[in-house]
Amino acid sequence: MSASPKAPSVASGAARRRRQRIVVWAPVMVLALLCLIISVINHNFFTFGNLVRMSQDAAIPLVLGVGETFIVLMGSIDLSVEGILTLAAVILSMTVLNGMNDNNLGVFAVLLVLVVGGAVGFVNGVVHVRLKVPSFMATLGSWFIGVGIANALLGGMAIRINDPMIRGLAIRRVLGFPWGVWLALACLAVAFVIQNHTRLGRYIYALGGGEELAALSGISVAWVRIVTFALAGVFYAMGGVLAAAQLGLGNALIGNGRLFTTVTAVVVGGTSLSGGEGGVLQTFVGVLIVSVLSNGMVLMGVPPSVQIGLQGLMIIAAVALSIDRKTRVVK
């Protein structure tokens, strides 16, 4: 008699595990299917030149995405991506060799903007944790503040970057790929190490699994949240460096549209918005899906308005799949 009540529970548990395995591998299967379909329709898809173009398009979303991934893993959201990226790109353009002033800080300018990005992220974390402001509201304010400061610094102008090191990130190549692509992969590697081989990475997952339980385990929830927001800010600033290098200048519009692509890549890759599941490698797959889909639609002549609509449908489907994996009930 005692075994019969357990049978449905065991069966449902096995079904849930099978569904989780399918969901984990679903983004990889979608990526492979997209590549197959697009290559059949347009044989130029797998040419080396097109692969280089896709890698360039994916570099900035990848750096931004790994930063956002840490925030989403905690069950929060960070909307300050465009603000920090824009501010970093503008400060970089004003402090390296440029066409507006005599500044020439070189690599120290890069370090400066990384510190600025980390500082803005730190403020995001403090406002969120200490003032009890929801993460999306705290970071939404930072988004507008960052863009506003960038506008004030430039006065509506654009600054051309003449620094050979910064321009080299987009122009100089190793094994046929720009330096910026290798820098983005290096950021992914650093994020992977932080996620899987540091105490901070373990704590981030713990918060996503349940903040109350993490606190009972002796984890300083406030410290982890603040440090993670600061870490994300550093990655967003590095995205600003790559954006300025690719564009060859800094202006207050350089971050437009980056937030949507970033969140899309994170969610499509399989990181749950509820927190605790996913990671930077999943975001890497998500970035590839978004880049392959965008590139493929261009090759097939799909209008830009339709491209945006398809990306919207893709993120809705990914979120719905994530909720199903977590077996949550929408209230």
Image (tube, rainbow, N blue to C red):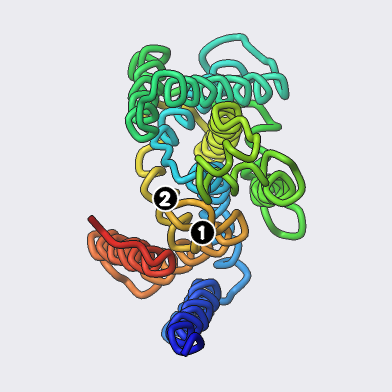
Instruction: Locate residue 283, reporting x and y percent.
Output: 54, 57
SS under mark 2: helix
The residue at which mark 1 appears reads as: 287
Compared to residue 163, the image places residue 12 above or below, namely below
186 on left or right of 258: right
SS under mark 1: helix
- Give the residue at x 41% y 29%: 83
Q: Residues within 10 Å of mark 2 (few under 14, many from 20)?
A: many
Instruction: Locate residue 134, reporting x and y percent.
Output: 35, 31
Residue 49 in which image quadrant: bottom right
- Give the residue at x 41% y 36%: 255
- Give the residue at x 55% y 77%: 21
Kind of residue indicated by mark 1: Val
* Label 2 with label 1: CB-CB less than 8 Å: no
Compared to residue 242, the image places residue 86 above or below, namely above
313 on left or right of 260: left
The residue at which mark 2 appears reads as: 263
Residue 252 in which image quadrant: top left
Q: Residues within 10 Å of mark 1 (few under 14, many from 20)?
A: many
Q: Nearer the viewer, residue 46 or 22?
A: 22
Q: Nearer the viewer, residue 64 or 154?
A: 64
Instruction: Locate residue 303, reporting x and y percent.
Output: 26, 65
Q: Which mark is residue 122?
A: none
Q: Is residue 172 visible?
A: no
Compared to residue 229, the image places residue 181 above or below, namely below
